[in-house]
Structure formats: C-alpha cells, structure tokens
Amino acid sequence: MFRFFINQDDQRIRIISGFTLVILILSAGFSVYSVMQSQIEEMATSGLKVALENKVKLIENQIAYSVANTKTLNTRIFLTQSLEKIYVDEFNDEGIAGLIKSVDKILTTHF
C-alpha cells in the first residue's frame, strides 16, 4: 500500500537524508574523539608519572635500608672483634682502644 505513494523523489530524499545522518554521526564521533584524546593522554601520563615516582621512592627506601643495615653490621663486627680481644687479654690496650673507637662511632652515627 505504501509503495503506491513512493516515487523517485522520495527515494532521493531518503538517500540524501541517510548520507546526511551518516556524515553527522561521523563528524560528532570525530569531534568527541578529538576533545577526549587530550584528556585521556593527560590521565595516562599522570598515572604513569605517579607510578614511576612511587617506584623510585620504593627503590630509594630499599637502598637506604640496605645502607643502614650495612653500617649496623659493620659496627657490630668491629665491636665484636674488640670485645673478643678484651676477653682474650684483659689488659690488651688494642682491644680497649678498638672498643672505645667502636663506641664513639656508635654514638656519632646513632647505631
């Protein structure tokens, strides 16, 4: 029944309106993409920057912890050696001097 009312002009109007609709949809999509692209890039770069800064802080903390442990271990070794020297010979001046040096080092470095 509707075919009776459809003629060549209606078909042209449909084709033109279809192309117009497709062009409008594509242009809207590209404009939204161009606006959102910069925001998405900024969010991604800021997220990566924060992640890398946290990784750097973690590595710095691990290095500081390792250095502190090394200093503590170093001081303990000398302290132990000095105490062993004193234990072997109570009147050993070298052991007492080493012990005093180790204690001074502990007091100055807070270890």
Image (cartoon, rainbow, N blue to C red):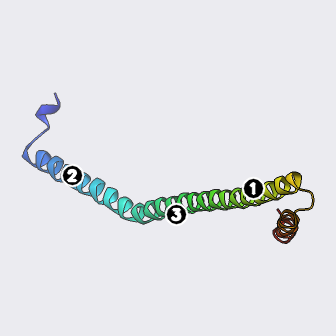
Residue under label 3 = 49
Q: Disc 2 or disc 1, which is closer to the eye?
A: 1
Report the mark closest to the observer, 3 or 1. 1
Give the quadrant of residue 2.
Answer: top left
Q: Is residue 23 left or right of residue 60?
A: left
Q: Which mark is residue 17?
A: 2
Disc 2 residue crowd, few under 14, some 14–19, many 20+, Cα 10 Å? few
12 vs 43: above or below: above
Give the position of the C terminus as an image quadrant: bottom right
Residue 21 locus on image (x, y percent): 26, 52
Please state which of residues 4 and 76 is positioned toward the viewer in this rendering.
Answer: 76
Residue 13 at x, y percent in the picture: 16, 50
Distance from the alpha carbon under mark 3 to that under mark 1: 42 Å
| SS label for mark 1 | helix
| Camera-side residue of 36 and 83 | 83
Left or right of 100, for residue 66? left
Q: In the drawing, what numbered circle is on residue 77?
A: 1
Residue sitting at x 86%, y 69%: 97
Report the amino acid beneath label 3: Lys
